[in-house]
Amino acid sequence: MGRPTEGGARRALDKVDSLNAWRADSVVLTASEMASLIGAGLDPAFRGYMDSLQVGLEEGRVRIEASFDTSQIPKDLLGPLGGMVDNREHLKAAGPVAVSEPGKAEWRVDQLTLGSFPFPRDVIPRLLERATGSRTATIPVMIPQGIRAVAIHPTGVTLYGRTDRP
């Protein structure tokens, strides 16, 4: 697990700059650098609901854990669970991340737990669509320009700058 650190986003961005300036074909980010990059790249409105952000790396997947402010979530969005959640709950979410266009990635959450309640996998897309007001069940994440593809491993996240990814 990695946590955003002071200077972590800068180190990650310096590595990304090497994809463009030095023509490196790939760079590897640590879990803490990835946490810093995710924290900086999440929609500020969504990021404002979280504190104590942690990022875990799994094969092909990113997992976040955070203390989540549920007080602004409409209780009907959570269905029967709405009456049982506290104003602050532990949130766990996991899924693959893919670059969708220059400067933008999409995180497809396929595991979601709020407090001690794991949401059924088939409910998660509808829940995210309603929560984000979007027609997609992914969470957009702004990423630096120059990243063309992402490979996630427990040991680090490889960012590719060229389209001919190995």
Image (cartoon, rainbow, N blue to C red):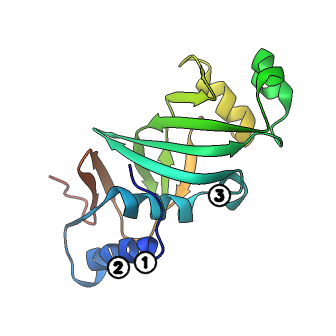
**Can you tell which quarter of the image residue 160 is in?**
bottom left
Q: Position of residue 113 (x, y in %)?
A: 57, 28
Q: Residue under circle 1?
A: 10
Amino acid type of the residue tagged 2 in the rendering: Asp
Q: Residues within 10 Å of mark 1 (few under 14, many from 20)?
A: some
**Can you tell which quarter of the image residue 158 is in?**
bottom left
Amino acid type of the residue tagged 1 in the rendering: Arg
Q: Please tell me which residue lies in front, 46 or 146.
A: 46
Which residue is at a point 65% across and 51% down the rendered structure image? Answer: 50
Q: Residue under circle 2?
A: 14
Image height of 106 relative to 90, above or below = below
Q: Is residue 136 visible?
A: no
How many numbered marks are there? 3
Q: Residues within 10 Å of mark 2 (few under 14, many from 20)?
A: few
Q: Please tell me which residue lies in front, 50 or 76.
A: 50
**Can you tell which quarter of the image residue 24 is in?**
bottom left
Which residue is at a point 31% across and 39% down the rendered structure image? Answer: 60
Which circle's residue, 1 or 3, is located before the other in the chain? 1
Q: Position of residue 74 (x, y in %)?
A: 85, 34
| Label of residue 43 in the image | 3
Which circle's residue, 3 or 2, is located before the other in the chain? 2
Q: Residues within 10 Å of mark 3 (few under 14, many from 20)?
A: some
- Cα gap from disc 2 to disc 1, whole angstroms: 6 Å
Q: Position of residue 80 (x, y in %)?
A: 79, 15
Q: Are marks 2 and 1 in contact (CB under 8 Å)?
A: yes
* Circle 3 SS class: loop
